[in-house]
Amino acid sequence: MMPAFNDRALLGGELLLRQIKYFQAVVRTGSFSEAAEECHISQSAVSQQIKALEAELGFRLLDRNNRKLALTPAGEYFYKKSLVLAADFARLCSNAARIARGDDAVLKLGYLRSFSGREFHLALNDFTEKLPDVSVRLLPGNHEELFDLLRGGGADLVMSDQRRAFSDEYVNLILKTDGVYVELPASNAMSRLSSVTAQELKNIPCILVASKGQRENEQEYYRSVIGLRSEFIYAENLEEARLLVISGQGFMPAEGGGANVAVAAVRRIPLFRDDRQITRNYCLFWKKDHTGAYIEEFAEILKSKFK
């Protein structure tokens, strides 16, 4: 039997979307062979599908001269618009899937507002790419805010530093034990030191990223545990804190990222105590009785990024 009209239209739509995907891969990689590898089909199949797409559209998308690929003017326009189409289609499918389920697939994810490492961003990108139907609700906070969110059910899992003994009520996944660094403006002579101590920093204000309700808690931690004796000033977010550092208003304890810093005007110096760099644990926490595919999936992805 011939397929019904709606079935034929659906099959035609799926084929067109697949051909556009192959075309986008060729443009992105600049190579039919690399696109074929990425799409898990043969090089000849990619070439045939793009030729079929051009035939369907009635104009050329690519110039193939001397084995070099170049977009035609129409191809360049089509490529840019197809990226928008692909994003819209993914959103459409995701929203329709939620409606069909009759509920919202949501992951409530808490994270340190001062964390500057790349691992969390990379994990979030991979998670949303792998599970586009799951909405991620991001909850920035300081350590105590994140603990309260997790304890009260406001977050499914949180990435934070370890400031208290591990509890058997939670899964306590250590992601990394990292050395403590401080960020100083590159113009400050102390930024050329190989290491620095709290004593040497005592006359320079310490910039902490903290919400208004958490300033006292953050100050107490950095004073009693890390050992800083400086005057404390505060920023609402990491960007504001970095601007304060660059403008010479103080130094900032670095959260995550190791010795690397992406801002040229800032340098990271190891913070030492008794001839050793101070260390701290960064962890992922969630309640043992609140496990699920989304939580464990994100945990595995984030753990892999810290490796």
Image (spheres, rainbow, N blue to C red):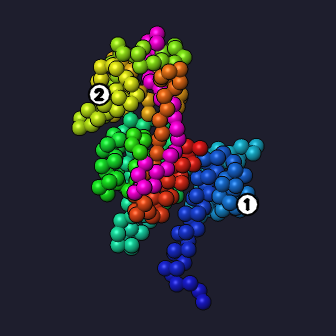
Residue 168 appears left or right of 230? right
Compared to residue 168, the image places residue 280 above or below, namely above
Q: CA distance from mark 2 to mark 1?
A: 57 Å
Residue 59 point in image, percent of width and height: 59, 56
Give the numbered dot on residue 131: none
Residue 40 appears left or right of 124? right
Quadrant where the N terminus lies? bottom right
Q: Who is closer to the viewer here, 265 or 274?
A: 274
Q: Residues within 10 Å of mark 2 (few under 14, many from 20)?
A: many
* Residues rendered magenta in the picture: 166-190
Q: Is residue 77 visible?
A: no
Q: Amino acid at mark 2?
A: Tyr
Residue position marked by numbered label 1 in the rendering: 42
Give the numbered dot on residue 234: 2
Q: Earlier in the sequence, mark 2 or mark 1?
A: 1
Residue 52 point in image, percent of width and height: 64, 63
Q: Secondary structure at mark 2?
A: strand
Q: Who is closer to the viewer here, 130 or 54?
A: 130
Compared to residue 17, the image places residue 192 above or below, namely above
Q: Residue at x 35, y 41 (%)?
A: 143
Q: For the residues carrying marks 2 and 1, which lies nearer the camera in this image?
A: 2
Tally of numbered tags: 2
Where residue 229 sits, quadrant-wise, is top left
Predominant SS along the magenta part: strand
Residue 211 appears left or right of 176? left
Residue 194 point in image, percent of width and height: 54, 17
Residue 149 point in image, percent of width and height: 31, 51
